Amino acid sequence: RASEEYYYADFERAYNGELKSDIVVLGSSRAFVHYDPAIIEDSTSLSCYNLAIDGGCQSMQFAIWKNLILNNELPKVVVQNVEYLSFGKRKTLFEKERYLPYLHESYFFKPLSLIDTKLWQDRYIPMFRYHGQWKLIKDAIGAFLGHPPRNPYNLYKGHKYKKQDFEGQEEINDFPLDPSDFELGKTLLDELVSDCKLNNLDLVLCYSPEFDNGANAPNEQVDEIVAFYTEIASLHEHVVFWDMRNMDLRADKHFFADNYHLNQQGATLFSKEFSSRLRQHLNR
């Protein structure tokens, strides 16, 4: 935690109650590269921080959310990027090392243990979590000796553009969600909705663009998830849902790094369009 490594910087700021922002963005890697706080701040005149994480399914995002609201001054607006891939939980805890210093907190441990059922070993057996983690041990020793971090923080308020040309297959072939994962995703989103209502926060659910050249196979589960988001927004005055998958750029590979992630050019256009909608929403 004292190492100032890239992996821990935002977690640590929130954990220490140092993360004060009017707008916070939650989500997976898509949110991480799609929502530029600088553009959002310029458009809305409100401070913004991107707390999205690579590989972050909803149970992982939920831990980040609880770390924020339990330790910091509350934001005014919560932006949750919603999507198919991060609904529910993963099969493995991606970038597990990011969470190791915080497993003593139940709000980290409980949602993460839904993914890694052996996480109790890391929490309760002294030093077990660092078994074989030589890079982390070296980072800790370096921090103790006053050395600079191995991976210094290089983001702007949690955000970093994906700077590359389109890679990989064009068609999106989503794997089917397990019914239990589907129900877990609903439960976690319901709790986020409840947290925002309890604290009088605006909640914006946004489905950001994916590459779609017209060749993507139909996915009934995606339709069901979108219907769920739509229903949630219709039932709660403090919630809106924006399905922004149909932006004009969706079929142009020049705006994407791969079929799920916008590149810098695409993310800039998306952030401007999203910011415009958000400004109008807040001024309603």
Image (spheres, rainbow, N blue to C red):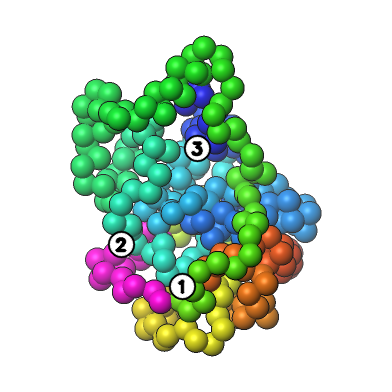
Q: Local crowd at mark 2 within 10 Å, few (<14), some, or many (≥20)?
A: some
Q: Secondary structure at mark 3?
A: loop
Q: Quadrant of residue 89?
A: bottom left
- Amino acid carrying label 1: it is Tyr
Q: Position of residue 107 (x, y in %)?
A: 36, 41
The C terminus lies in which quarter of the figure?
A: bottom right
Q: Is residue 27 above or below residue 227?
A: above
* Residue named by callout 1: 229
* Disc 2: which residue: 184
Of marks 3 and 1, the one in the foreground: 3
**Disc marking residue 7:** 3
Q: Which residues are magenta?
A: 173-189
Looking at the image, residue 132 sits to the left or right of residue 99; the answer is: left
Q: Amino acid at mark 3?
A: Tyr
On residue 117, the disc is none
| Residue at position x 36%, y 34% in the image | 100
Taking depth in this image into account, of 162 and 158 the one nearest to the observer is: 162
